[in-house]
Amino acid sequence: MPFLAEDATVPDSKLARAITEYIRDTETELLFNHSSRVYHFGALAGVHRGLTFDRELLYAGAMFHDIGLMPSHSSQTERFEVDGAHAGRDFLRSHGISEADAYTVWTAIALHTTPGVPEYMHPVVALVTAGVEMDVLGLTYRQYSDAGREAVVSAFPRTPTFKEDIIQAFYDGIRHKPDTTFGNVKADVIADKEPHFHRGNFCSVIRCSHWHG
């Protein structure tokens, strides 16, 4: 994609190639293309904001951020974000990446659905969320040029019904553990697909605790 500044391209490294191969073999085409767009939109946001960031770590965070939706990486009791964070950290450890850098990627993946917090954290954490918020929610759509958006989507296409397709992918990945959506945005996904779903209530938890008064 020639429109990208060099600082925003996928690094031509052994680690990045290994990540690409692993995610392509593990995820659906929908999630692989989405994750690839998340990297590019996140990297472009980083360049635009004048941030200094490690492209390999950003690529790892972006590409692994939804792997927890896949049955092969989905636990029975953890949030899908945490499953993905564990997978990303373990992959990086197995490729000799330092514990500190692996933890940065863990944090980026774990927090990518927690609005209002990542933007104030490490650039890799902030930019994974920035890419997700652009590709799924379109929150910063107008901050990207038409040419920039079109080039990313041309390289990694959105399905004609991507909005509904990604909601369905979220649901398919978490429907077996609805309790893990307590207090986070994925409860909306369950409620959208299951009209009789009763989400957890924070105030009810407080009132029903063993404390007196």
Image: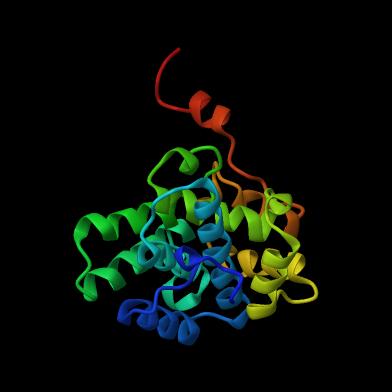
Q: Is residue 73 above or below residue 98?
A: below
> In this picture, is 56 found above or below 115?
below
Image point 38% across, 79% down: which residue?
12
What residue sits 43% from the left and 57% below the top?
109
Residue 87: % across, % down: 36, 69
From the top left corner, tell me how far across and down residue 186 is, in percent.
60, 53
Quarter of the C terminus within the rendering: top left
User: In the image, is 208 to the left or to the right of 193?
Assistant: left
User: In the shown orientation, is residue 71 left or right of residue 104?
Assistant: right
Count of number-bearing discs: 0
> Relative to the observer, which residue lies in front, 131 or 44?
44
Q: Does residue 112 show up?
A: no
At horizontal 34% and vertical 79% (from top left) the residue drawn is 13
Q: Please, which colouring scheme is shown?
A: rainbow
Residue 114 point in image, percent of width and height: 52, 45
* Quarter of the image with the N terminus in it: bottom right
In the depicted structure, whether residue 188 falls above or below residue 88: above
Q: For this view, does 83 lie left or right of residue 140?
A: left
Residue lying farthest to the right in this orientation: 160
Q: Where's residue 156, x and y in %?
A: 63, 78
**Front in this rendered view, residue 39 or 187:** 39
Q: Is residue 95 visible?
A: yes
Q: Nearer the viewer, residue 134 or 169?
A: 134
